Image: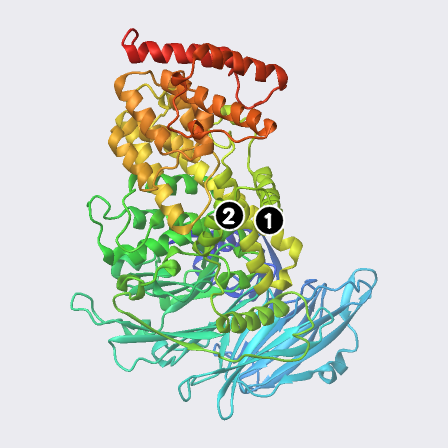
Amino acid sequence: MLKLKPKFDLHRDVVSDILRKEASVCRVEEYSEAVDARILNVERDGGILYSWKGATGTTRIGKYDPNTEKNKLLYTFDKQVCISSCSLNKEETLLAISLAQNVQGQDHFRPMSKCLTLLIEIYPINNTKVLKAVDCRVKVQFLYQETDRRSVLESHLLLLTEDGYVDLYHVLLTRQEGYRVVMANPERLSRTAERIVEDFCWVQWDGHTQRFYYLTHKEKFLLRCVQFYPNHHCETMLELQLELPANPFRTVKFVNLGFDHYHTEQPEQELVRMQVFTNRIGSMCVCYSQPQKDKQELIYTVVLVHKDCSKKFRVSLGCDEQPPPKAAQLHPLFISIGYYIVVYLQGVFLHCINTRQHEMLCHSLFLSGHEGNLDLQCQSANITVLHGEGEPGARLLDLASGRIHTAELSPAYLLQILQSGMSSRCPSSKTDPQRLAALHCLLVYMGNDPNLELKIIAWLCGNVSTFESFDQIQEFILASLYRIGYEKSLSLDKVLPYSSVFEKKEVPDCLLQVPGVFCTTELHIEPVFKGRARSLEGFWSELQWNTERTKYLDAVPNPRFRTSHIRADWEKLKSERRPSSQMNHIEENTKKVLSMVDTWCLDKKPVPLFQEEDHQQRALIGLTVDKLRDHLNRHLPRLGKKKIDSLVVNYVAKLLELIRHMLESVWLKYKIGPCALCLMQQGSPAEWSVFHFMFKILESTQSLCLPLPPGYHTLFAVFAVRCLPHHTFLQYIDQGLLQLTETFVSRLMKDLDNSDASERLKFSILKRLPEPMEQRIYHMWDHPVTSASISRDYVRTLLEKDNKNKGFAFTSRDKPGFRPEFLPLTYLANKLSDIEEQALNPLEEQENVDARFVEETALKQTLILLGFEEK
């Protein structure tokens, strides 16, 4: 499920370099046994701080730069010391270190207290200042602030203690002799300390966003977030009440504040494991696992602050074939990858939770047993998740081996989930939720890869039969379209179409339940935004907007746009015969959409689309734009009309491009050539497969009332007449499954011969055409019947016009039953000629029709009726 890539190896990237550099000090063989390199911290810039025991009994601290892949020695203690915490300032001039009590023996660095915290000048090595000497653990962390004040040299250091308080030190620096950076007035350093937190039992640092979260408890547990600004000031931005068991932490828990190799907690002593994840577009997830009441069930909670809800999951661990997890595996690992939260319990399950579309379990992927195992070389209890906002994948640190891996969702594995079990003609509905979740993950989270999209389309082509619980073509279309807007705003999650499952009146039970997983949702968790959160731009502004907008959308009816709801408006629009202001407005929408579609070199495209005027589809394209734009303006006015208009036009244009892309893929798969468009030949098995796939696309889009590219119906009708028996073809028309376009009927009349079977088909089609189109089609088929009909219409219309000018009505002979052969043909021809001479172009639309044509048609028709000539 997760693809692990090695990013850092302590032995490969650090120890081997140490051995090369210090080979001159002692023999490498002897020294290699003495190297005890340990990772101490990972700073915001990705730099990795580490320490090692020197060959001469020293302790050294270095930094590995992942950008240059080089190591740098920062400081050397002339004795062996136990470093429990370490941090380096951004300018690499100061080093903050906490030393645990040295158990090796007597030395002048052995603190009288349990922990000694030092601030050391290292550019150059000059002065050491003792910040604290206390009987509790102390964590140190420099702020990495972006500031424009180049002339002021200062650093800001956090000290977080096991006693539950946090101090912020403001360290002023000065430059001496042009290059020496030293502390200004180090004796006054303690006076600059600012107490910013008085009491906490759990704290997590987020270096990328320069904020920390801490948990405090009085009557209830309260999670607070402190944000640091570029001017080094800080403010509490958020308070959130959490439901936690009593005494969840036996000792103060530090998360993402370096690694203390001299203080380790046994996993079985860890009552609650908790982490906070954020994303720059305004999402926040608080994840924590709760104590097991028994060994057969695991409980974990994911609080979705941006969705104003909390989801508690209970996963059954009871299985006869599967032993219960060991004590070291009581708590799962929480990993943030994009907008997914991965909950992993080694050897038991992997739950990939969709934090954007969380309403239904089927949009989150759950794998149990060996299916959910990661390729880890160690126990998951020894893995630390390194936080980093905005990174494509998560970083996992195996502290024992000193290896860092990036973890990303594996598209190959997700494709396997789609393809698994598809050899059966009736796929099992038990796997439908997994396939649905995998499909959405591939299309939305990973969908920017064109090669991946081609593989998904190939899967669709090979499995055109609809699944038992969902329509995969509808899911492909809606999820791909959702991808266009999901990065722009979290508020679009509840407004844009996401899945056809939401269109169902009754959702199948298999999509509402996942075996072994029970979920309860608590709405309205009521986060409290404090301070300047309401006036800030960026993360806090987006988070607060998303939370408030979620409350609003939960309260209004039908916040999610449903394309099927515009069907009534479209039917009304199709019935209009005269142009109107609304029709003109909709046509302008259509022009905007089609201008966004790639129409370059249409004649060289494999599939002939966008090459004709399809008035019905053009109307539906424009109507879809109009309705979706109104919906977004009504519910998300903050996005702005210009941004919404661009989003909507791109959305509908992408829909048309998607369908063309699907057709092009199946075209290439079955090697369809230009001869497939010839109406005189019967369709091949490959063309039948293309027709079947096109029918599924048509069926899926019609049920959602989605527009199709102009030319789609013509192309579908061409394949239908080649692949289907004529009576079945006509049934498709009568059932509304096949739309007769003027382009198709014109080609049919011209290309098919006048054999008995072809004539029957043509007459059957003519009877099914609307009257305006029928009149135009008559002129395209050279046949006595059509010629006679054209002549009758011409005579009737011409005489009606002449009689109207003379002021008297035409007799009953103008009715459809009137037969012009009862009139003296010569008199009629002369009469028509006189009228034609008096009126210039009396019927411009009647091409190649005049009195001579009528006379010849009448004579020919008489000969046929008398049996002297065959049709």
Residue nearest the observer in this picture, 751 or 794:
794
Quarter holding the C terminus is: top left
Q: Looking at the image, is 754 positioned above or below residue 165?
A: above
Residue visible at 52% across and 45% down in the picture = 576
Residue nearest the observer in this picture, 158 or 287:
287
Amino acid under disc 1: Gln
Label 2–label 1 contact, CB within 8 A? yes
Q: Looking at the image, is 95 positioned above or below residue 572?
A: below
**Residue that label 2 marks:** 573
Nearest to N terminus: mark 2 or mark 1: 2
Image x and y of residue 86, in percent: 58, 70
Number of numbered discs overlaid on the protein picture: 2
As drawn, the residue found furthest toward the bottom would be 219
**Residue that label 1 marks:** 582
Amino acid under disc 2: Leu
Mark 1 neighbour class, 10 Å CA radius: few under 14, some 14 to 19, many 20 or more = few
> Circle 1 sits in a helix, a strand or a loop, which is it?
helix
Image x and y of residue 867, in percent: 27, 9
Q: Is residue 606 left or right of residue 761?
A: right
**Is residue 661 at least partly visible in the picture?**
yes
Kindly report the distance in space between the C-alpha atoms of the residues bearing marks 2 and 1. 9 Å
Residue nearest the observer in this picture, 496 or 836:
836
Q: Looking at the image, is 301 positioned above or below residue 784?
A: below
> Circle 2 sits in a helix, a strand or a loop, which is it?
helix
Task: Report the disc number at residue 371.
Answer: none
Mark 2 neighbour class, 10 Å CA radius: few under 14, some 14 to 19, many 20 or more = some
Image x and y of residue 510, in percent: 27, 62
Quarter holding the N terminus is: bottom left
**Is residue 607 at least partly visible in the picture?**
no
